[in-house]
Image (cartoon, rainbow, N blue to C red):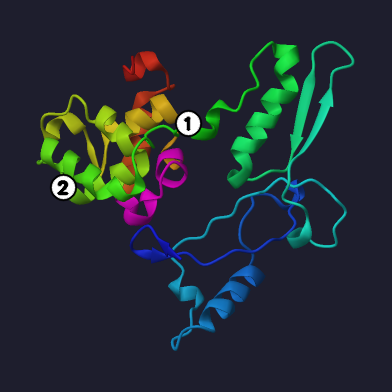
Amino acid sequence: MPYEDDYTLIGTTDQPWTYAEGEAKISDDEIDYLCAAASEYFLKPVTREDIQWTYSGVRPLFDDHSRSAATVTRDFVFDYDNDNGAPVLSIFGGKITTYRVLALQAIRTLSDALDVDGDDWTKEAHLPGGDFRPDRFDSLVDQYEDRWPFIDRSILHRLARAYGTDTANILADVTSLADLGQSFGAGLYEIEIRWLIDREFACTAEDILWRRSKLGLHMNEGEQRAVEQWFERQGPLSKANLDLS
């Protein structure tokens, strides 16, 4: 699938993983498998030399004793213990496409113990920055370009894609490029880093470049190192030393 404008994402695989194996990462067998599978659709084969970056994640699944990881249920399972002292709700499995249903069921399970409302108010609720119609995205970018004409449209487009209407909050006090702070390359400025620390709990350069975004793909080693050095200069992260009030 198209990925980060300039790349193609190829995947995925399902392989069991244990802590004893160390850091989760793609194996040589998985690389060979994915390259071979993709190559079936192109005249020019996809090879290891074409790979720019790989990433792996560990998906916690409920052990339903399936024969393979690919057939293990993706449903979530609750284990609620309310017999001794404070109630404990353990959640196993689940995935991002069912997170709202999971959250709703969790609140309903705990509603009596916590004395909270278990109504389904989130059904029509927007995620942060998501309060606009998808077919109005280009118009949203147009509005930002009109308001901040000194910022390249490609940067505004990426910000809108990442933060939606929160882009206006990020740039609220910006009246010139200088107000964006240090430029790190690939359209990343200090003002966005500070927003990610304050609102999305980023703590390291890796959080910024590879977790909250994939801007590391568009940066050279020197630019990535500049982000690391910025964090090193901040010392221990806090609202006090980053002036994020």
User: Which residues are drawn in magenta?
Assistant: 207-222
Name the residue at 44% across, 33% down.
126
Displayed quadrant of residue 235 = top left
Which residue is found at the position 11% from the left and 29% from the top?
175
Magenta run includes residue 104: no
Report the residue that reaches farthest toward the bottom.
Answer: 43
Instruction: Give coordinates of residue 36: x percent, y percent.
Output: 58, 80
Residue 238: numbered disc:
none
Can you give x and y, in whole percent of width and height, for residue 206 in the image? 45, 42
Circle 1 Cα neighbour tier, 10 Å, few/some/many (<14 / 14–19 / ≥20): few
| Alpha carbons under labels 2 and 1: distance apart | 31 Å
> Judging from the image, what secondary structure is the residue with disc 2 in?
loop
The residue that mark 2 highlights is 152
Q: Is residue 175 left or right of residue 196?
A: left
User: Is 86 above or below relative to 72?
Assistant: above
Q: Position of residue 41 (x, y in %)?
A: 50, 83
Predominant secondary structure, magenta span: helix
Q: Which quadrant is home to the C terminus?
A: top left
Element type at mark 1: loop
Tell me if 131 is positioned left or right of 73 in this view.
left
In the rendered structure, find residue 125 and report the number of the disc placed on it: 1
Magenta residue check for 216? yes
For the point 74% across and 14% down, which residue is it?
A: 112
